[in-house]
């Protein structure tokens, strides 16, 4: 499945702006034998996911990598199902929500135990988690809706990393990050002192200087997330976006979701929802995927150089 560059794209949405990003690459989905109800299992191997570096102009070079999950099978990063029976597929719409602030430790009686009780994570004031005491939620995902014949759901393990090279994605060794120590992954270009606690400042693109390949240091390969791609509709949201107000004195009321404005140019609602296109099951039986489109959406907070974000993507088969 080679992505059609004219129809495959991502949008990086922050509270203030949306950045359209081109997607180029390919992914091989291995189909199993159809079940009695017409559903077909899918497996995705790590080596079969090849997404080219993505230039976020003026900011970062984004790298998307597949990561192995042994429970999906040796060497696999994803598994899923295509509904090629007469009944199609249920629960094809995917909704992800991330709350930047479940509470603020020490404010209005909120405690660390309150955060733990909600399965939250407390920010420690580091570069990666700058709002000390804020309790972040973990992603909450819900499913609904019905998909016609050819609808598909695919769960994948993916790491998205941002290399702070001003979005060039060039081959070079000047851009550096901290490895080890107490501040791993921190930017240290021209400032090795950023690597506290015994960390070392090394090229973010690895010894060969090529971005997004296997020799990049693990600290520059991003945090692994479990994502669901679908041929239905997917949405993502960040509540209390930014964590705190600009003066740092109160919890933010901003949000990144399809119901809010995000300061885009021209002014419009946040780009936080995208819809795919089912497979043609008759063509799929012959290995033809042309025209099918899988979509995904994920949310992150406190991303280096970006802040809070929702990223929606469409992968259309050529």
Image (cartoon, rainbow, N blue to C red):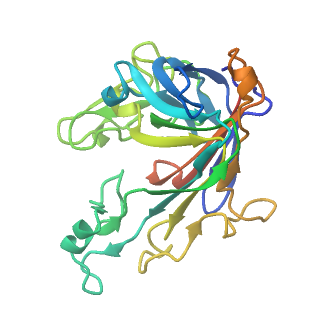
Q: Tell me the residue at 48%/24% (across/down).
A: 43
Question: Foreground: 77 or 125?
Answer: 77
Q: Tell me the residue at 21%/43% (across/down).
A: 182
- Left or right placement of residue 156 versus residue 73 in this view: right
Q: Residue furthest front?
A: 36
Q: Position of residue 99 (x, y in %)?
A: 44, 65
Q: Position of residue 259 (x, y in %)?
A: 67, 69
Rendered position, 81 above or below 51: below
Quarter of image, res 264: bottom right
Rendered position, 88 above or below 302: above
User: Which quarter shows the C terminus?
Assistant: top right
User: Which quarter shows the N terminus?
Assistant: top right
Quarter of image, res 152: top right
Rendered position, 250 above or below 38: below
Question: Foreground: 71 or 237?
Answer: 71
Res 62 seen here:
no
Q: How many marks?
A: 0
Q: Residue furthest bottom?
A: 108
Rendered position, 187 above or below 72: below
Q: Tell me the residue at 34%/75% (across/down).
A: 103
- Left or right placement of residue 166 versus residue 196 in this view: right
Res 275 seen here:
yes
- Left or right placement of residue 112 versus residue 164 in this view: left
Q: Position of residue 157 (x, y in %)?
A: 43, 34
């Amino acid at each position: 499945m080679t992505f059609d560059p004219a129809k495959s794209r991502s949008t990086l949405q922050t509270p203030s702006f949306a950045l359209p990003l081109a997607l180029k690459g390919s992914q091989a989905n291995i189909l199993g034998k159809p079940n009695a109800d017409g559903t077909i299992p899918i497996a995705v191997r790590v080596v079969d996911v090849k997404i080219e570096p993505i230039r976020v102009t003026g900011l970062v070079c984004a790298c998307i990598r597949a990561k192995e999950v042994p429970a999906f099978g040796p060497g696999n990063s994803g598994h899923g199902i295509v509904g090629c029976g007469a009944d199609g597929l249920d629960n094809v719409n995917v909704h992800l929500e991330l709350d930047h602030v479940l509470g603020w430790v020490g404010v209005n009686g909120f405690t660390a135990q309150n955060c733990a009780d909600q399965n939250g994570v407390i920010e420690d004031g580091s570069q990666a988690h700058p709002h000390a005491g804020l309790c972040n939620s973990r992603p909450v995902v819900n499913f609904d809706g019905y998909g016609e014949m050819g609808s598909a759901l695919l769960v994948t393990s993916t790491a998205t990393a941002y290399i702070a090279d001003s979005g060039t994605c060039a081959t070079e060794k000047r851009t550096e990050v901290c490895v080890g120590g107490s501040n791993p992954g921190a930017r240290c270009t021209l400032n090795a002192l950023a690597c506290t606690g015994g960390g070392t400042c090394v090229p973010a693109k690895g010894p060969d200087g090529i971005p997004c390949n296997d020799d990049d240091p693990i600290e520059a390969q991003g945090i692994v997330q479990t994502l669901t791609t679908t041929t239905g509709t997917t949405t993502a949201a960040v509540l209390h976006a930014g964590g705190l107000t600009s003066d740092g004195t109160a919890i933010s009321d901003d949000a990144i979701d399809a119901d809010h404005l995000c300061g885009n140019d021209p002014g419009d609602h946040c780009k936080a929802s995208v819809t795919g296109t089912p497979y043609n099951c008759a063509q799929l039986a012959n290995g033809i995927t042309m025209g099918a489109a899988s979509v995904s959406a994920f949310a992150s907070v406190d991303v280096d150089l970006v802040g809070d974000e929702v990223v929606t993507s469409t992968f259309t088969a050529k």
